Image (spheres, helix red, strand yellow):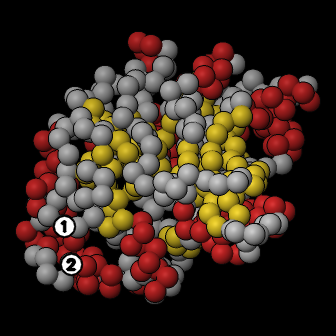
Amino acid sequence: MNEHFDADETLAPQTREARLFERLALFLTEAKANVPGWEKRLADVDTASITSREALAALPVLRKGELMEAQTAEPPFGGFVHPGMLDGARLFMSPGPVWEPQAPGIDPWGGARAFFAAGIRPGDIVHNSLSYHMTPGGLILDEAARALGAKVFPAGIGNTEQQVEAAAILKPDAYAGTPDFLKAMLDKAAEMGRDLSSFRKAIVSGGALFPSLRAEYRERGVSVMQAYATADLGVIAYESAARNENGGEPLPGMVVNENLIVEIVRPGTDDPVAPGEVGELVVTNFNPAYPLIRFGTGDLSAVLDGPSPCGRTNMRISGWMGRADQRTKIKGMFVDPRQISAITKSVPGIARARLVVTREGERDAMTLKIEPADGASPDAQAIGEALTAHTKLKGLVEIAASLPNDGKVIDDLRDYSK
């Protein structure tokens, strides 16, 4: 059995680097010619000269906030999409809101490699529980599994009992979805007396896989691997294992996906950091429909030294290490400080608000703490309804006498080491 998805995964690093930068100059030239947003942003750039990491690093980082501002000014895509490549495409709205199109072709988000590294093979049945509604999450995994030759049950989110019943009948080999929903399914199956022992493999994304939860899955007979993906870029990196040596236990770090250029920059700047230093993950893709050049993910990571022992030779990163800004992923959905600001404006009597994110068992939980305006008594029920309306998530509301004056809007108190 092949240990790698294709020969690209074992290229000599210098060969891969040369190929990427041979493609980059032409890609930038075409983006400048065909995409209005890049025509403006690259107006003074000789794109033919961008043939090295040093030259690429001279371009400014495009951060999510700038993209959102462009989309607000020129909806829906802010001029950053190739207008001639949208016919027949799916269009998505992710939290923020941020709009994204689906690129043409098979496996447009590049996820098949991550499924292969997780041990999923042609003919396997994959139970996909990421959302297919409005955001691209479910389809990122769906397209990847199908490109690999697996069969997919598009379960989506919620309806846990129905999902358990379906899985008990289909007997899927693998689960795909958020890290904690698999536990909800397994626990519900035990309550219902249904057998879900067919789940032996899983690929998870959209949230942190805590070590305690991974260990619990291992005890329950499920080998779980992570993929690091975003709605904008697709699968950026994924875990791998030396299966013949350690029984499928994940190796350190995550392998960067092929056909991406990844940089780590000092948060708040455009400057690459020294190897091994923690900074913001910046990605350049080769997506002709939705070119993203030096796109700042807002996520923190670091480059690990040397190739993975699994034999894949691409750059390794430490995985997700927190946020360079306060935008935070909760239950698989990003929540942005702008959304909290919108809540404070929609309900009278709020002076300040802070969203506190914690863990209850193996699940994310959130509480919106409110400092009332002088003499005001804000309506907690109305605030709760606004919280759900603006974030698409449910949480508690707590009225506090005062909140710290430290500029923090989202306070993530989850311990990612446990």
How many labels, in total? 2
Identify the residue under disc 1. 59
Residue 11 horizontal/vertical position (percent): 21, 38
Q: Residue at x 46, y 74 (%)?
A: 68
Q: Residue at x 70, y 49 (%)?
A: 367
Q: Residue at x 55, y 68 (%)?
A: 338
Q: Mark 1 belongs to which amino acid?
A: Leu
Measure the alpha-carbon separation of dots 2 and 1.
8 Å
Residue 371 placement: quadrant: bottom right
On screen, residue 141 versus residue 173, left or right, reads: left
Give the answer, above or below, for where 3 lies relative to 52: above
Residue occupying the far top of the picture: 245
Q: Quadrant of the N terminus?
A: top left
Identify the residue under disc 2. 42
Q: Residues within 10 Å of mark 2 (few under 14, many from 20)?
A: some
Give the answer, above or below, for where 107 lies relative to 5: below
Q: Mark 2 belongs to which amino acid?
A: Leu
Residue occupying the far right of the picture: 192
Q: Secondary structure at mark 2?
A: loop
Residue 333 at least partly seen: no
Give the answer, above or below, for where 140 lies relative to 118: below
Residues tagged 2 and 1 counted as in contact (Cβ below 8 A)? yes
